[in-house]
Amino acid sequence: MGLGKLGLSFFRSFVILLLLQISSSDYQMGEHLCHLKRDYSPTFRKEGDVVIGGFFSLFVKSEAHKSSFTYSPNWIGVHKTFMLKHYQHFLTLQFAVDEINKDPHLLPNITLGYELLNNLHSNKLAVENSLMYLSGRDLTIPNYSCDRQHKSVAVIGGMSSTLSMSMATILGLYKVPQITYGPFDPLLADKIQYPYVYQMGSKESTLHLAVVQLMLHFGWTWIGLIFSDNLRGQQFFYDLEEAMVRHSMCLAFKEKVPENFNQENGEDVIFFSKIIKSSSNVIFIYGNTYSLLEFSILMTQYILYGKMLVTTFSWDISAQNNNEIMNHLHGTIIFSQAKREIPGFADFLRSINSTVNSEDIFLKTFWEVVFHCRLSEESPAKMVYSLCPEGLSLADVPTRDLDTIIMTLSSNIYNEVYLLANAIHQMLQTEIKKTLEFGVHPLLSWKLHYYLKCLNSVNDANNEVCGDEARIVAETYDILNFQFFSGPIETLVKVGEVSPYNKGLIINEEDIYWPEDFPQTPNSTCSVSCGPGFKKILRENQPICCFDCILCIDREISNQTDAQQCLQCPEDQYPSKERDRCLPKTITYLAYEEPLGMTLASATLCFFLLTSLVLGVFVKHRDTPIVKANNRSLSYTILISLTLCFLCPLLFIGLPTQATCLLRQISFAVVFTLAIASILAKTLTVVLAFKATKPGSGLRKWLGSTTSYFLICICTLIQICLCGIWLGTHAPFFEMDLHSEASFIVIQCNEGSLFFFYCVLGYMGFLALVSFIMAFLARNLPDTFNEAKYLTFAMLVFCSVWISFLPTYQSTKGKAMVAMEVLSILISSAGILTCIFAPKCYVILLRSDRNTLEILKNKASL
């Protein structure tokens, strides 16, 4: 064991000596490399007591610019717009540092410096710049720092999450705080993998709600979604889909944009064909410029005609640099973080000229591209442009080219500089008591992490930043309208703003220029909205936005657009013709004031008077042969009963009451039974009179009036008994019928029991049928005063009327049913009056010469 321990100790000593030798060799190599310089300087550095690194992306990297900042004249024109937008990031950091250095209360006696590097949107260059930043020289020297004073404490950089990850692979090894200014990415929030990365970009946690509010405002419920194929895009898709479902909106399609389209397999054709064939007119595109780079390139081949695009400021559509594409992007709606204006920033821009920082390579490049001139004879642009005139400044750049308002990413950079300044300020007050110790403190950047957790940005106590959780706030988004005109002239016009949790949506539609494919506000729905009066019926196996419109059924309405269900009107109301509202029902009954009631009442009175007149004629001429020969007493009974029959309709006309409901059917039944029984007795008397003329006939004793009145009383008494049972069990009653007629409340009498009602009618029909049969059989009897033919016709009319009445009564409702019964009473009564008494009245009144016993006897002898 002793030898084993001695051997292990010896091995450890050997390894330590070997490492010291290697370290000594690396140190000597590093010392040698620190004295070497590149032919060009890829950075711009301004010294200070504390130096902040700025990793920005000014140019779009191409194959011609992999390792230098040289560029061709054609490239200058293509990327001018892109440079104008992103050079603001460099200027914002410089402005913020200068502002802090002038502040006597923030970092007193400490000067901030900065080191600016250009990543060219290349992950490879992001790693290389990280090594240059750590080494303190233009060359990349791994694991060695040429800067003895450790002045560089933190890095601001990462326009995209991929660039931030590439930088973190190197900077994280040395625990260098890295604050990204690009869009928030959930992958970078993983503190196990990226413990020293802090994100300043908004989480856009309410962007999906803002999008839904805009869509609802314009009625766009059938939306297409194109999003980047990464965790951030996937999370936005889930959030947007959930919000759309809550508001009954649908995704017509959803397509992930791959990093690389396999064009050999036609993947790009399939991708764009789905978009073009979709019935959705509005497409939302989510992702940043670089995750959608290949999609943007392919848009030059597959132009989306007839599609309204909505996107975010992260996808910089102005980077297309293709007039045809830009023309089709005209009218695009863009969501952007609300702009903020920094006091003094505009003056700062106007003060910048080509001689302010002659060593600033980024300013030099920017200057030559923007002003189309070269600053020196050595400039690579000399083959095209002449030397720049003196006195040029950024104030000469058109406002549309260089916005003096801080944009979203620049605002993040401005806040990050102040965040670092506040963190350093608090750390110096807590950790280091003497400023002299500052320059030699080896763990300064490591200690800074603690103070970056929770600090206020820009000294605003209401804007507290605590790591990556700080951006879960009620965000406000500007709504911009991209407008592109011939010239070419492009501009972004603010047309509104949306704050999902505060003010909601505010938009000025008159300021919006829609795409040329849409002469007015675009419409994007799967189905045309169902107007009031209709309800939606979902199509089978299709999203809820695809439906058919069905008219509401009777007694139902829908008073809103796209109603899921129709609403039933209250019983005292009825739906309008359009089925969009309920109207109060009108109370109705067979009134005397209306034409139908007035007509029936007039007819009733006329027939009543006519019957009374006939009765008067018969009474006046009671001693004439024709009246005596036709059983004078029975004729009086029939005429009296008919007079009462013609008065019965008056009980049916007018506002029903409980009394009239009880009386009208009973009175009608009893009086009509009396009339029919009298006719039956009259018919029987005729038959018996003929039979009794035979010698030895025993029927003579039945020819008296007693027999006739007994028969009438028996028949009428039976009807009275039926009516009594009816009244005692299911008597008629007054009611308000709410359902028979759609737009009316019918005040009517309910018969109580249809069974007894039809029993009463059936009994009258039975008597009428017996009378008809007897009269029909006796129609040819050779009697002088035989009136069987008239009785036959009278009963035929009566039976025909009431047989027709039954089905008609069943098929009508409300006051029409009452009118039908009144009409049946009048017609049947008038038929009896006419058929039986009209011939007699004709003889009595107009042919009195025939109303003699001799004429009648002569007629009988013929």
Image: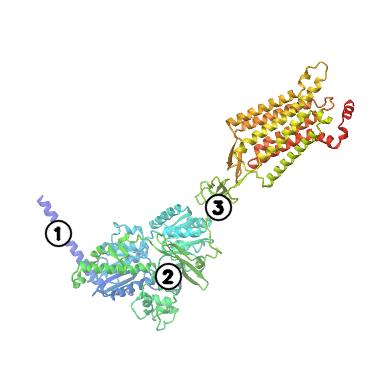
Residue tagged 2? 82
* Coloration mode: rainbow
Please give left or right for residue 861 compared with residue 86 in the image. right
Residue tagged 1? 13
In this view, the residue farthest toward the top is 696
Front position among marks 2 and 1: 2
Amino acid under disc 1: Ser
Front position among marks 3 and 1: 3
Query: Residue at point 86% right, 32% down?
Result: 851
Instruction: Tell which circle, 2 or 1, labels the residue nearer the N-terminal end.
Output: 1
Instruction: Tell which circle, 3 or 1, labels the residue nearer the N-terminal end.
Output: 1
Query: Residue at point 74% right, 31% down?
Result: 637
Asked if one can make out residue 483 in the rendered structure from this viewpoint, the answer is: yes
Amino acid under disc 3: Pro
Residue tagged 3? 532
Quadrant including the C terminus: top right
Please give left or right for residue 217 compared with residue 778 in the image. left
Q: Secondary structure at mark 3?
A: loop
Asked if the residue under mark 1 is in contact with the one under mark 2, i.e. CB atoms within 8 Å, the reply is: no
- Crowding near pointer 1: few (<14 within 10 Å), some, many (20+)? few
User: Quarter-wise, where is residue 696 in the image?
Assistant: top right
In front: 11, or 163? 163
Residue 838 sits above or below residue 145 on the image: above
Q: Secondary structure at mark 2?
A: helix
Q: Secondary structure at mark 1?
A: helix
